[in-house]
Amino acid sequence: MAYEVNNCSEQCRARRPRAYMSEFGTTTLHLKNPWVVTFWSFAFPGCGNLMQGRLVKGLVLICWELLVNNQSNVNLAIMYSLLGRFDMTKQVVNTRWLLLYVSLYVYAMWDSFRGTVDLNKQYLLADREDGPMRPVVIKTLDTNFLDKQMPALAACLSLLMPGLGHLYVHKVMTGLFFISWTILVIYLSHALQAVQYTMIGAFDMARSVVDMQWLMFLPSIYGFVLHDAYVSAVEQGKLFQKVQSRLLREWYQHRRFKMPM
């Protein structure tokens, strides 16, 4: 109990901290392009909030989008519209749920843009204050520490399996969520069965077995995890350098200091 109090006092001493570390991950403030965050909310509502570090809001919006999208068949409507089969688009879409999808989209994009602008201001103030930060957190469930990760490796791990890149940069909750989400989407879309039939040349079987309503979630998942894991690795490396720089300035005197005789 005493260790937790000391740990909190170390991280909360700064009026505006640049980051917060726990055994479940590291949440950092850094400059973001509001339009990029808004784009990811457009690609999949909730992903923009995850980029901001607002985990609960992002996960709730993602789950809400999954529910409304599947009930209204938005992915199927998009696919048929891209193929020019507008008659099929009218048949598959469920307008009772579609109107809920509009409000979800508008809020997610607005909140992502507004929140990113405000968080950028908070980062500038926190960076100017340059407050102290504890670089290591040791708890019963896990150990977290600041380090310089390889952004390319984070992206490759995310390409191998969405969520692994986030585990690499120690965003445990986000990583486990994306792993679970990807397993669910791949299973319900029969994507692996379609890959198997494609590899043996049974293209008709591959087309018949795949569920496009679920399969069309994968491009958004892969695109976001690649981008977010890469950016997280880069920004955590910058945070490590700033914390180390502050430590060296406090502990070591200037090289031009003349030793008294």
Image (spheres, rainbow, N blue to C red):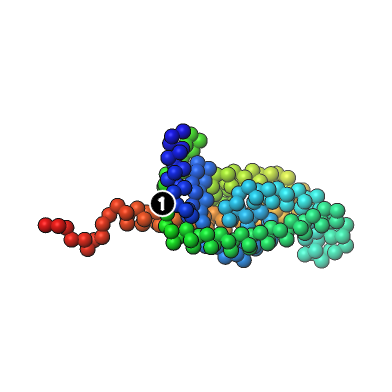
Horizontal side, residue 144 vs residue 203: left or right: left
The kind of residue tagged 1 is Pro
For mark 1, give the secondary structure. Answer: loop
Q: Residue furthest left?
A: 261
Pointer 1 local density, CA inside 10 Å: few below 14, some 14–19, many at least 20 = some
User: At 35% from the left edge and 53% from the top edge, which residue is drawn?
Assistant: 247
Q: Looking at the picture, does residue 143 appear above or below residue 51?
A: above
Mark 1 — residue? 132
Between 140 and 83, the residue placed more toward the observer is 140
Quadrant of the rendered image containing residue 145: top left
- Expressed as whole percent of the image width and height from the top left, the position of residue 133 reads 42, 50
- Expressed as whole percent of the image width and height from the top left, the position of residue 18 reads 48, 55
Between 17 and 19, the residue placed more toward the observer is 17
Horizontal side, residue 146 vs residue 27: left or right: left
User: At 44% from the left edge and 44% from the top edge, which residue is drawn?
Assistant: 9
- Expressed as whole percent of the image width and height from the top left, the position of residue 19 reads 49, 52
- Expressed as whole percent of the image width and height from the top left, the position of residue 82 reads 77, 64
Horizontal side, residue 88 vs residue 53: left or right: right
Question: Looking at the image, can residue 32 be seen?
Answer: yes
